[in-house]
Amino acid sequence: MVEPDRVFFVRVMREWVSRFTGKVIENFEIHLSQPMGFAGDIMSLTEFATSRQVKNLVLDFSDPIQRNLSQAQQTIRDCLLRCRYPQKNDLDVSHLFFNLLYVRTLTVCSFFLQVLQDCDDPMALHDSMKTRHLVMKTNMHANDFVGISIFLNSCPELESLTFDLVTTSRFVRAPSPLVNIDPVSHWLTSKAYECLEKTLKVVKVKKFRGSSNELHMLQYLIRTGCVMERVDLYEANGLNHNQKRWVLAVVEEVQQNFKRASRHLRITLHNA
């Protein structure tokens, strides 16, 4: 979507919500790739949704075009977009979090997970959230891990957690020079958050490929999830024979050798 079309689209959205007279919204989704420059609009739309007691809220700022690009093409496109869009975060993350406190079912993307790192004290952004069902669209890059941890810490009543793994490259954002995350040490040193000790029963991983970052995260959740009942791994589509064998071997390793905090946990691989 070219820039004039994006501006027009957002203006139409704002006009539509200004005329909406209902008191309750069941589902509200904001899909806007490369949202720099639209912070005020995003805040306004989110406030509108939460003021109408939205049941299911989706905040997706990922770029769907990158799904069809090669790694080289993605790198070139990222460089071009960095020239076009200044790399600054004008989104008031703490304010946005405040708007999300009472959303029971929430979906967020890698962009949202990563901008949390720009806050001075991201682990003390706000009061506890009431989210029961959380979906994270992520490529499981190490840059997403701090955001994942923040959400786990912020949702003490969380019951189900879904990772919808995407095959896109990074979204266009210059990484903070202070952020250098080692996946192994991050998850080994992460504490067991309240939801893992008391409420989280179901973890789902969609488009599972058995990457090392996926396994480090799973090992942490399985090791600390005291009341967890199910870990459902959904094999990614389009895997060749060797990739399928790898996924099967990885899942057997998870089932047999990962230390479990819950005696009632079942780990299941669902074929594509």
Image (cartoon, grey):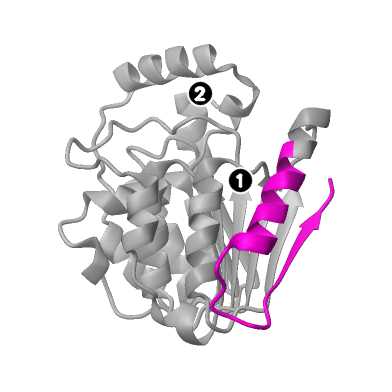
Q: Quadrant of the C terminus?
A: top right
Give whichever of 117, 15 is nearer the camera: 117
Q: Residue at x 33, y 21 (%)?
A: 82
Task: Give the SS element for disc 1.
Answer: strand
| Horizontal side, residue 213 vs residue 189: left or right | right
Q: Amino acid at mark 2?
A: Val
Q: Residue at x 52, y 76 (%)?
A: 225
Q: Is residue 122 above or below residue 50?
A: above
Q: Which residues are magenta?
A: 246-272
Give whichever of 201, 168 is nearer the camera: 201
**Mark 1 burial class by Cα count in 10 Å: few <14, some 14-19, many 20+:** some
Numbered tag placed on residue 2 in the rendering: 2
Res 239 → quadrant? top right
| Horizontal side, residue 150 vs residue 75: left or right | left
Res 68 → quadrant? top right
**Mark 2 burial class by Cα count in 10 Å: few <14, some 14-19, many 20+:** few
Q: Position of residue 165 (x, y in %)?
A: 61, 46
Q: Which residue is mark 1?
A: 165
Q: Is-magenta flag for residue 266? A: yes
Task: Give the SS element for disc 2.
Answer: loop
Q: Is residue 196 above or below residue 16?
A: below
Numbered tag placed on residue 12 in the rendering: none
